[in-house]
Amino acid sequence: MSRFRRLSHALWHCQYHILWTPKYRLRILTGQVANEVNRCIRAFSEQKGCEVIELSIQIDHVHLIVGRSRYRGEQNRKFII
């Protein structure tokens, strides 16, 4: 599969790298908390029409790379809100 998406008059490659940290970078993302964060991120991404390309939950932060599966022009910036 090509990393580029296309429609009849558009070609795009849109990915966002998101870094999320708990307040004061507390080391709380372990065990059940990490599982719940994983579940919530995947559910929210599916709800917003995003593809989770990479998700790495560390003990004190989360790295997330998401891409849009459909072209939405200017709305791409608003998918998180």
Image (cartoon, rainbow, N blue to C red):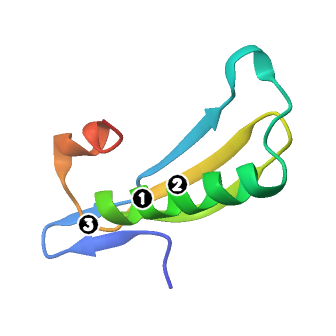
- Which numbered tag is attached to residue 54? none
Residue type indicated by callout 3: Arg
Among numbered discs 2 and 3, the one appearing first in the sequence: 2
Mark 2 neighbour density, 10 Å: few (under 14) some (14–19) many (20 or more): some
- Compared across the picture, whether 35 is left or right of 43 comes to right
Would residue 68 be found to the left or right of residue 31 on screen?
A: left
Contact flag, marks 2 and 3 (Cβ < 8 Å) = no
Q: Is residue 77 above or below residue 39?
A: above
Q: Marks 1 and 3, Cα distance to the nearest angstrom? A: 13 Å
In front of the other: 53 or 57: 57
Q: Single out the residue that lies furthest toward the top.
A: 24
Q: Quadrant of residue 75?
A: top left
Q: Position of residue 76 (x, y in %)?
A: 27, 45
- Residue 63 image position (x, y, % from top left): 69, 44
Residue type, mark 1 in image:
Ser
> Which element type, helix, strand or loop, lies under badge 2?
helix
Question: Does residue 49 show up?
Answer: no
Q: How many angstroms separate mark 1 from mark 2 (CA)? A: 6 Å
- Could you tell me which quadrant the C terminus lies in? top left
Dot 1 and dot 2 residues touching (CB under 8 Å): yes
Q: Is residue 65 visible?
A: yes
Which residue lies most toward the bottom here?
1
| Residue 36 placement (x, y as % from top left) | 63, 56
Disc 3 on helix, strand or loop? Answer: loop
Q: Residue at horizontal 41%, vertical 53%? A: 14
What residue would you read off at disc 2? 41
Mark 1 or mark 3, earlier in chain: 1
- Residue type pointed to by label 2: Ile
In the rendering, at what x and y percent does residue 11 appear?
28, 64
Res. 70 mark: 3
Question: Label 1 belongs to which residue?
Answer: 45
**Going 86% across and 41% down the picture, which residue do you hit?**
59
